Amino acid sequence: MARKHESSKLPDSTQLAVIGGGPGGYAAAFEAVRQGLDVTLINDETPVGGVCLLRGCIPSKTLLEVTELIHASESAETMGLRFARPEIDVDALRQWKQKVVKTLTDGLEGLCRQRGVRLVRARARFADEQNLTVEGDDVSGTLRFEQAIIASGSRPATLPDVDIAESRRIMDSTGALELEEVPESLLVIGGGYVGLEMGMVYQSLGSQVTVVEMAERLMPNADEDLVKPLARALESRFKAVHLRTQVSGLHETPRQVTVTLEDADGSREHRFSRVLVAVGRRPNSDGLGLDGVGVSRDDAGFIEIDAQCRTNVSHIYAIGDVAGGMLLAHEAMHQGKVAARTAAGRSAAFDARAVPAVVYTVPQIAWCGLTEARARDEDREVKVLKFPWQAAGRALSLQADDGLTKLIVEPDSGRLLGAGIVGPQAESLIGEAVLAIEMGAVAEDLALTVHPHPTLTETLGEAGELFLGGSTHYG
């Protein structure tokens, strides 16, 4: 039976201290309690949920649902349906987003009580290898622990000489999600998934959006053929996309931001109502007192861990964004369970063959396992199977004929090594590929699986058929 604890009451000692209440932290705490450990979860924010729930995954996808609805209403004209431009109530939209977040945070608070996780609202810092200094508005003291899991997450990176906290017109992803206003013009610095997702949100609400990216193309971490349909969509929706371009100057006034953009042709100035800085994330590993206990970090500040999520200090673990990797909530949750089981003396390891990544733009992009680009960089021989969606009936009915499903397989055996999808519902479709990779499936397994017709899931089966010499509707 789960132990019942009062929130915010600091005990003298605990078997397991979990620092951080995001997806990795609360997943670790829940699993550790299930394994029979006494658990204290220390969270420095009033709601539990971390970046994902409070300032990332959930609020951004809530707003992106609006984006999909607006884009769908616009594209419906080619089907014979005409909708008037929607009237957007930004205050109501903001309240709806907050309602979704609050529902989930309240649910987590209830689960902590129900499952017997002691929740302490405070900041934690290592005093030594067995003690934490804990300080909050209502609690302070020293907590002795037998083992600890660091799940402190990450925060948005910024540009040199830019103080976003003091700025009224330059914001990071956290500020963008507050939706204080819909600016007339918005510059997004960074062509990764955060910048493009938020850029699409603001564009759909009425902003003229410009994107600046230093690399040769958008989403440089994803395979180029998956990004192409999105790049084409952005060309028509965004005011401009500047590649191989960097920001060399920012000057903010009460009414606008003057930005100096620099590329191979020289520099030029542009003016924007607001600027969104989306240039990556930094680990929250500073301020924890890690140097004092000897926990190793790499040059970027990420904590170094092994397959059991242990640091070099054997009874201290680290999971999620603070430990690097793909910086994804679902990765953190699985690592949290591995760390908790290991702390409880169970045999566990984080050895996922395929951690899926999803970009919730319109169209969506998703991939997992080995990418074509990585295979090329590693000089690894693979066979790439591509099924274009113009050969899929369901895709045509959705006006998604520019979509694509691709599989990366071993040339001889056909064993599935990776997959990528671009198009509607990619967020859900990728799940079948993840399972196939984890199960050691071959392309023929996908081909022999009876997929319902007409659906987009058929594209995975037809891509698998290509390994056998040709699919029913293509090749």
Image: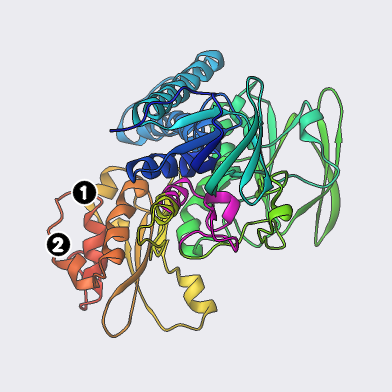
The image position of residue 28, as x and y in percent, is 43, 45
Question: Which residue matches tag 1?
Answer: 455
Which disc is residue 146 wearing?
Answer: none
* Res 12 visible: yes
Q: Tell me what residue is drawn at x 52 percent, y 42 percent.
A: 18
Q: Say whether residue 55 is magenta.
A: no
Q: In the image, which residues are magenta? A: 308-336
Outermost residue, front side: 12
The relative height of residue 107 versus residue 451 in the rendered view (above or below) is: above
Specify few, some or many for label 1: CA neighbours under 10 Å numbering under 14, 14-19, or 20 or more.
few
Left/right placement of residue 327 relative to residue 331 reads right
The relative height of residue 299 versus residue 122 in the rendered view (above or below) is: below
Q: Tell me what residue is drawn at x 60 percent, y 24 percent.
A: 179
Q: Earlier in the sequence, mark 2 or mark 1?
A: 2
| Structure colour scheme | rainbow
Residue 443, by quadrant, is: bottom left
Type of amino acid at the residue the image marks with label 1? Thr
Left/right placement of residue 33 relative to residue 235 reads left
The image position of residue 294, as x and y in percent, is 69, 59
CA distance for labels 2 and 1: 14 Å
**Number of numbered labels in the structure image:** 2
Nearer the observer: mark 2 or 1; the answer is 2
Type of amino acid at the residue the image marks with label 2? Thr
Quadrant including the C terminus:
bottom left
Dot 2 and dot 1 residues touching (CB under 8 Å): no
Q: Say whether residue 327 is magenta.
A: yes
Which disc is residue 449 wearing?
Answer: 2
- The one of 133 and 149 positioned closer to us in this rendering: 133
The relative height of residue 428 versus residue 312 in the rendered view (above or below) is: above
The image position of residue 173, as x and y in percent, is 63, 37
